[in-house]
Image (spheres, helix red, strand yellow):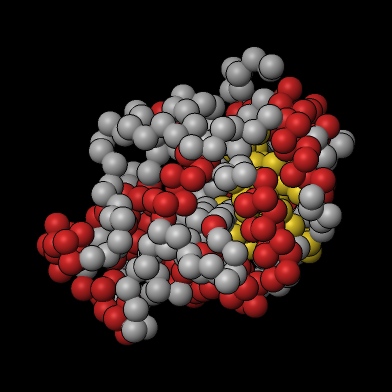
Amino acid sequence: MGVRSQPVSNKWFETVAIAEQRARKRLPKSVYGALVAGAEAGVSIRDNTAAFDELGFRPVTAGQAADPQIAVNVMGQPCAMPVMISPTGVQAVHPQGEVAVARAAANRGIPMGLSSFAGKPVEEVVAANPQTLFQIYWAGDRDFMLARMDRAKAAGAVGLILTLDWSFSHGRDWGSPHIPQALTPKEILPHAFELLAKLPWCWSWLREGTIPRLRVPNFASADEQAPLFFEAYGTWMTTPPPTWEDVAWLRSQWDGPFMVKGIARADEARRAVDAGATTISVSNHGGNNIDSAPAPIRVLAEIAAEVGDDTEIVLDGGIRRGSDVVKACALGADAVLIGRACLWGLAANGAAGVENVLDILNAGVKATLRGIGKDSIADLTPADVIVPKNFSPRPT
């Protein structure tokens, strides 16, 4: 059964799926395509959400808590619920971009992950949400990475996220969206028809007196000109991948909470902990890493069994409703990260749309805990979830 649409005149939406519908209607085709992304045949991106549907609950009918407790503490930060904003790339979906997301997250008591490929500088984002975690790729030489970390620290970032789950697999069977190098007249012309079909989106930018700049200010020092997206991407793509010794070195340069993002195997989870990770993100980069990698929820229990007593674990991938959050926490996650869900809310209704998404998840987490008779998110165990046979791959 499909998702029933709501009238766009009513900017509130009741599910993340409706937010995605709104985003698809509002955004130019190429912008929406960049958000959906995925790799190769799209096996992993589909499995990220489908895997959650294979998990079930056994509800109770009496004795439930009226107001289950859902607050947690992750990366040294209090979270009003076990949800954080995942760092995502250039947010050309809305003129206020990451600042709008940061403001919405702060209003709901949620930490904000800020990508190195973000369109807004770290200083502005931290000003909107002091609970900002700066994300970095292993890109450029060590001095270049240290300069960006120092900038983030000076701006007030409270944690560092090192993302490792990317293998530069660019082919997509449905075709990749064209992302211009810069919005010059020559680049805009091929997009003229799709832009004219999305005038409200265009007007939102013109009303702010700007256009998408396609620059990444956090890929430079504060006093340097922000490079264009593909200039930064080229630096990242041509940098040799790090060793675990490199990861340990990077961790030694940051004196706060340190997350390694992209873990999908128990043996690598152990190596990340040995390298100094205080938090591990179980992730396949939203289905954008190698295709046919399992959904993060399928390997979560394996990783939690290996390192759950030694480090925090967050899950990133496929979260669309509060019950997904509860399933992840029951199988070993301390919290989850949301990426596309947040961006769909941003596209649908700016900062208020992001707040709407967070409210949906908050209500869903409480409703699910109430339905299975749990007083607190901390009371969850794997026994609270029905896991089918062969749900997870053989442990590494």
The tally of labels here is 0
Q: Position of residue 231 (x, y in %)?
A: 42, 52
The quarter of the displayed image where residue 30 is located: bottom left
Q: Position of residue 64 (x, y in %)?
A: 76, 55
Q: Position of residue 38 (x, y in %)?
A: 40, 39
Left or right of 92? Residue 177 is: left
> Is residue 246 visible to the viewer in this orientation of the structure?
yes
Q: Residue at x 36, y 29 (%)?
A: 40
Quarter of the picture holding the C terminus: top right
Viewer-proximal residue among 145 and 357:
145
Q: Residue at x 40, y 74 (%)?
A: 95
Viewer-proximal residue among 372 and 53:
53
The quarter of the displayed image where residue 75 is located: bottom right
Question: Which residue is the extreme one toward the right?
Answer: 309
Image height of 170 relative to 37, above or below: above
Q: Residue at x 44, y 44 (%)?
A: 234
Q: Position of residue 250 (x, y in %)?
A: 74, 44
Viewer-proximal residue among 356 and 218:
218
Q: Residue at x 31, y 56 (%)?
A: 181
> Is residue 334 visible to the viewer in this orientation of the structure?
no
Quarter of the picture holding the N terminus: top left
Viewer-proximal residue among 25 and 269:
269
The quarter of the displayed image where residue 83 is located: bottom right
Left or right of 393? Residue 286 is: left
